[in-house]
Amino acid sequence: MTAMYKELLAHTPLLALPIFAMFVFLAVFLSVVVRAFTHDYADVATIPVDQEDLHE
Amino acid sequence: MSDTTLERRTIVYDDSVSRKFVFASVTWGIVGMLVGALVALQLAWWPANVAPYFSFGRLRPLHTNAVIFAFVGNMMFAGIYYSTQRLVRAALPSKLLTNIHFWGWQGIIVAAVITLPLGFTQAKEYAELEWPIDLAIAVVWIAFAVNFFWTLARRTEKHLYVAVWFYIATIVTVAVLHIVNSLAIPVFAFKSYSVFGGTKDALVQWWYGHNAVAFFLTTPILGIMYYFLPKAAGRPVYSYRLSIIHFWALIFVYIWAGPHHLLNSALPEWAQTLGMIFSIMLWAPSWGGMLNGLLTLRGAWNKVRQDPVLKFFAAGITFYGMATFEGPLLSIKSVNGLAHYTDWIIAHVHAGALGWNGLMAAGMFYWMVPRLYGTKLHSTRLANFHFYIATFGILLYVIAMWTSGVTQGLMWRATNADGSLQYPVFTETLAAIRPMYWMRLIGGTTYLAGMIVMAYNLVRTARAGKPVNGTAEVVVERAPEEASWPSIVFGTPVILVVVVVVLGGFFLVSNAFAGLTFVTLAAFIAVFGSIAFSAAKASGAKRAWHRLLEGRALLFVVLTIIAVLVGGVAEIVPTLLVQPEPSSVAEAHPYTALELEGRDVYLREGCFNCHSQMIRPFRFETQRYGEASTMSDSQFDHPFQWGSKRTGPDLAREGGKYPNIWHYQHLTDPRSVSAGSNMPPYAFLATDHVNFARTPNKLHAMKSIGVPYTDGDIAHASDAARAQGGVVANDLHDTSGVDVAPDSEMVALVAYLQCLGKHAAAKPSTNVAVR
């Protein structure tokens, strides 16, 4: 590890955990954004309004 | 769909549970807000603290619990049960579970109504209920979860609409939050100590507290918005794509933001920074959701003018936008330095609770109740009247508290040219904001009046009709298309994410040059891999990967849990392993037996509702209260008592500032030594006695969670407490002729107050202001 990392993690080595988790977040977020904007959800979005409100 | 066989079926939904939850919500909402009006009155006019059982410190938790868990909780359950059955086209599977859920939840609320005024409390905000009730909450929540997921398992609509995702996130996350934050060592039937102490308890508590806001007051209501708003507007949600991003971003980011409640405190700096950054990031998904809601009304604003339901929804979502703009703003450290501990925070939470939760609840009730009873709303004019007085009430309330909060914050930090405090007497700041307390009371009471109008309108509506259950004709796919598990687990998006994450791991453990290479490679793969995958999907006939995922409820739940836990674990685990500096630990010692008993009186009376024990590292704070607080100051505090509001001054270094007799007089009649104080009198403590026979049990419990009491300390706890009580009582007699029993609660509390700031290694400053 470089001196910078050593200094960062000197008192709390587990600090790597939140940094790593932030990286996971960015990866997942990017993935979700790309996926969401490349597909058509028109049929799914109408589920609530397509239903008839019947009652007994 | 080549092998599919179709079958027509009629489903009868169980709407009886929604009817019960609706009226439970309205009833408890009125009760909770009535208690809110009473505590607001107590702050403005102290004689309203009519008896020990009904003092501010005991009633304020009742108010917050009633509004959050009884009003919003019951409303949320009503909406979830109603919409989920229709969204997945399946009736609830178990009447027994439904009844356990409904009656169990009402029983818990009744238990809260009884125990909180009696002083049974864990002294952790929004988690005050004692351990037997915590266990009951866990059982009832499990019944709810089983009922909900069982319904999903029976669904005839394969796709899980976005509202259901928010419900799933709510159910799994609240379970995790509740279990972790409620971990405590029982001492007696209604007495326990949190297993976490000091800074660790602070982080866990506000990880819970903030996410109670997120996953109890926000995600379920967003789910309700995504179902009921399109229904009422008669058009689909503005952007389903945006709702996907909204969901994943919100649940991933929200869980990190808890430390913004602990900015400028003794919490490790990295955790504060992390909390601040994620709180600011939270603005984006929150406003994504708000805009998605408001834009659903595009082209339908003419309906908003006529339909009270849409009026409530539009205003509720607007308040959501306002509160979620204010939240990130308040999480900026410098802004937080001004706003924290002031009424600005009270304004913020009420903009959310009254504006977002309350108005969304009203909109949902006005939409649901006529349908649940097969009739029309009794009076649209009354509903419109309710809308206008509720909005007026919220605005009055919020403006009053904004003004009060900013005034408080500025007065606390105001200094003269020579650097001394401009307002060294704390009650000066209290006097300045008192008119705002009356204005808040008027605003809150106006809102409560609107709730009563709504209750009347809904009851008249229900009485005009009769209970009816919804039905639906569904066409069921006998052999619906199933994607294989390997195709999902080893799908391109998962592989992409794993590759990117592994490269990210290499980045962390390699040197600067290699690290840069790895992170560049990871970014390249993430961006171009996703684009390539999308292009391939667009050209092929396969269903989108996320659509497959949504069809797999169990996998969806697992991924949601992972998304939520990543932030929580990454933030909490390092903090739990942090220890105060060794020298501080060596010099610090735990509370004496009498001080521990006095501390329990402090917890029981809810002193933490008005007094913090956390001096922030600002000059104006250290001048007023003493040296800034450190981790070691509160390391033996189970639970921590840093507080979140200063109606009175900070007490972290109260010990030794005043003689015993001053505390006796202050507790007996606060205004006798502190003119203008609004603190309730606690004269009864002089005649109520501590049962020292039970003191060893308390020390033993504390020892079991890491407080360094010896076996000798525990064995002699009762005698030691009596002896120290005698010293304090004798001092009161000798200095002022006051006779009070050595085993009185007054003596114990005075002993506790006199030790604050004395046990830890840090030394209190002598440069302190007067009250």
Image (cartoon, coloured by chain):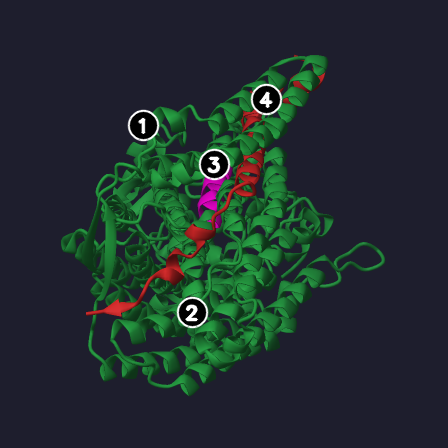
- Secondary structure of the residue carrying tag 2 is helix
Decide which of tag 2 and tag 4 comes sooner along the chain.
Answer: 2
Q: State the residue position of label 2.
A: B232
How much space separates mark 3 and mark 4, taking CA atoms? 20 Å
* Position above or below: A32 against B147: above
Q: State the residue position of label 4.
A: B504
- Asked whether B723 or B56 is in front, the reply is B56
Residue B55 x, y percent position in the rendering: 40, 67
- Secondary structure of the residue carrying tag 1 is helix
User: Three-letter amino acid code at disc 4?
Assistant: Gly
User: Three-letter amino acid code at disc 1?
Assistant: Asp
Decide which of tag 3 and tag 4 comes sooner along the chain.
Answer: 4
Q: Residue at x 55, y 64 (%)?
A: B294
- Identify the mark at residue B636; answer none if there is no mark: none
Q: Quadrant of residue B195?
A: top left
Q: State the residue position of label 3.
A: B568
Q: Which chain is red?
A: A
